[in-house]
Amino acid sequence: MAKRNIGVGVQWPQQIREARKALHPLAKEAESRREKTRMVGNKLFINNELRHKYVNGNVINIRQ
């Protein structure tokens, strides 16, 4: 069999891609303050606490 460059990547649903795109600047800002960030689906955790959630096209601030 010939070698082929085949990429197998995870394709996220459109809604999750939009959520991550909206939450990304908030995550980068927190990382610049040396805080631990993690995105799970449409949620952004900062220092293991749920801080932001993307719902119906809007970013909701859960905790200040």
Image (tube, rainbow, N blue to C red):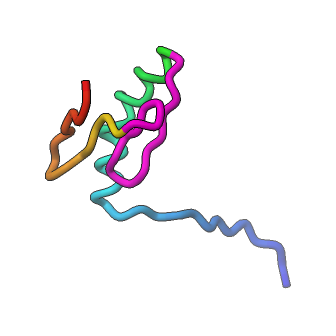
Which residue is at the front of the view, 57 or 2?
Answer: 57
| In the rendered image, the vertical position of residue 44 relative to residue 56, given as above or below | above
Q: Residue at x 42, y 51 (%)?
A: 40
Residue 6 sits above or below residue 59 on the image: below
Q: Find the residue positioned furthest to the top.
A: 33
Left or right of 54: which side holds 7? right
* Horizontal and vertical percent position of residue 62: 23, 36
Q: Nearer the viewer, residue 34 or 58?
A: 34
Residue 6 part of the magenta-drawn span: no
Query: Residue 24: x, y in percent?
Result: 39, 35
The answer to which quarter of the image holds residue 6 is bottom right
Q: Position of residue 30 (x, y in %)?
A: 43, 22
**Picture quadrant of residue 8:** bottom right
Q: Residue at x 28, y 37 (%)?
A: 52
**In the image, what residue occupies the spot 47% across and 14% down?**
33
45 w.r.t. 34: above or below: below
42 part of magenta stretch: yes
Quarter of the picture holding the N terminus: bottom right
Tell me which segment is drawn in magenta.
34-49
In the image, 12: left or right of 51?
Answer: right
Q: Is residue 34 above or below residue 54?
A: above
